[in-house]
Amino acid sequence: MKITFMGAGSAVFTRNVVGDCFCSEVLKGSVFALYDIDAVRLEECRVILEVMRSTMKSNAKIECYLGVENRKAALKGADFVVNTINVGGYDPCTIIDFEIPKKYGLRQTIADTLGIGGIMRALRTIPVLEDFARDIEEVCPDALFLNYTNPMAMLTGYMLRYTSVKTVGLCHSVQCCAKEVLSDVGMLDKLEGHSELIAGINHMGWLLEIKDKNGVDLYPEIKSRVDEKLADPTFTNKVRFDYIKNFGYFCTESSEHNAEYNNFYIKSKYPELIDRYNIPLDEYPRRCVNQIAAWKEEYKRLLEGGEREITRSREYASHIMEAIITDTPYQIGGNVLNDNLWIENLPKEACVEVPCIINGKGVNPQKVGALPVQCAAMNMTNVNVQLLTIEAARTRKLEHVYQAAMLDPHTSSELDIDTIKKMVDDLIATHGDWLPKFN
């Protein structure tokens, strides 16, 4: 079995997934092909995986492939391709995504999924995925592409619509959703044996049903505690609880993410909302700085003391591989094309997040039916931006970049059309060669 990691220098993530594979009887002897364009990050990843392999007494083979000239070799014969690339990285591109919009009065929290930051991230990543796809189609056409890179819906949607690569998008916010809401309202004792239904789009999937082990609906009790949580000045998950209050359902991704997916919470004319909802502006740059520093310390510790214990993480990737290889059904929340109207009231072109059964036949999305109309409407405000951004990346038409930004709910609630266009032009110019040329 050959498993190729694109962007293997995302070392923490690669370590987790390879560690999961080491914990699997089916996967532990695989060939792990590590590909990156950063020699330092690639070597750090190799060293750590060798330490892990020694700890687990694994007979796995670890191969390294540096640079575009070695990309096909990394992919050749792969059974699975795990994508974790970050085109442009924290410095300069994430910094640009935050600092340029700030000049125009547009503040963000994470900027990796939607908003002007999500648009820019997609526009610089899709051309790289296009190159990956051409190589995969040539040297490992039967491989399953497991995409973990954001913006999830835009990247996965592009791969599924405009390449022949078998693709599923994966995000761990689905498997954490029920535990988080139950923990927040002091009902964690109801988690064991619970059942749930989650569907929507990535980072805005809706917890449509949640029942305890006896089939009792837990939503009435959850909703009875919402006002208390919203009134608590120390509570940090307020945006998602405000969703329950106003739209009836909890959603998958964190409040700091969802604060910028709509036109409700980050508003320069209502600065008091930032404190009221505990919204951490500029959160992702802070997180990047902290993660970089933490990785340096972690790398030093691992070199000095080794990996003491390896346990399986919450990530889906290794379970998906096992399920396909052994033809043993396993359920995930996956990002797939809505081509068969898995969600009836979202468009076929949309990338949706729905329950999927994994088995020897691959990824099998499950029919959900129609979302509650208000949930579909909220999703559509994001889907519109996703579809236009994909179109901009595909056609290289500047007008579609403008239109994606103009229809973004947060951007359009803060800026007028002329200012939006000036900001887009500024972002494109500042990104320089990190972005393709637009007509």
Image (cartoon, helix red, strand yellow):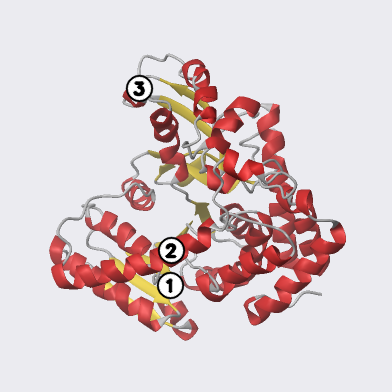
Residue 142 shows up from this direction: no
Q: Sequence-wise, which precedes: disc 1 or disc 3?
A: 1
Q: Sequence-wise, which precedes: disc 2 or disc 1?
A: 1
Residue 269 shows up from this direction: yes
User: In what element is the residue under mark 2?
Assistant: strand
Residue at x 34% of width, y 63% of height: 12
Provide the residue designation for mark 1.
75
Separation (CA) of disc 2 from disc 1: 8 Å
Closest to the camera, between mark 2 and mark 3, is 3
Q: Residue furthest right?
A: 418
Separation (CA) of disc 1 from disc 3: 44 Å
Q: Is 200 left, or right, of 308 in this rendering?
A: right
Provide the residue designation for mark 3.
190
Provide the residue designation for mark 2.
81
Q: Position of residue 315 (x, y in %)?
A: 37, 49
Q: Quadrant of the N terminus?
A: bottom left
Where is 201 relative to 152, above or below?
above
